[in-house]
Amino acid sequence: MRLVKLDTPDGIIYINPEHVVAVVKGLRDTKVDTVSGVHVVKDSPEVVARLLGMEEIELDVTPKAVGWKA
């Protein structure tokens, strides 16, 4: 089992890359969704993805339709 050390606002956590579901960019921090829960880390999504060993990053640049009525 390989663990990756990530820095959070509360301290340091270790995450198994095999349990990561998604890495999401927020306004200030990056959210890492795992099978056990959600963790907020200080690094950018690109740095987190590289540390987790992801080979490619799929960027979704579609704007969120907040307040739109169809």
Image: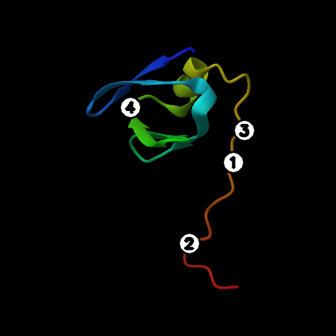
The part of the image, by quadrant, that contains residue 43 is: top left
N-term mark: 4 or 3: 4
The label on residue 42 is 4
Answer left or right for 29 relative to 2.
Answer: left
Q: Which residue is mark 2?
A: 66
Q: Which residue is mark 1?
A: 60
Residue found 63% across the figure and 27% down from its top: 18
Q: Residue 36 at what x, y percent from top left?
A: 49, 41
- Asked which secondary structure carries label 2, the reply is loop
Q: Which residue is mark 3?
A: 58
C-alpha distance separating marks 1 and 3: 6 Å
Quarter of the image that includes the C terminus = bottom right
- Asked which secondary structure carries label 3, the reply is loop
Seen from the viewer's position, the closer of residues 48 and 1 is: 1
Disc 2, disc 4: CB below 8 Å?
A: no
Q: Residue 20 at what x, y percent from top left?
A: 59, 34
- Asked which secondary structure carries label 1, the reply is loop
C-alpha distance separating marks 3 and 2: 22 Å
The part of the image, by quadrant, that contains residue 59 is: top right
Residue found 40% across the figure and 39% down from its top: 40
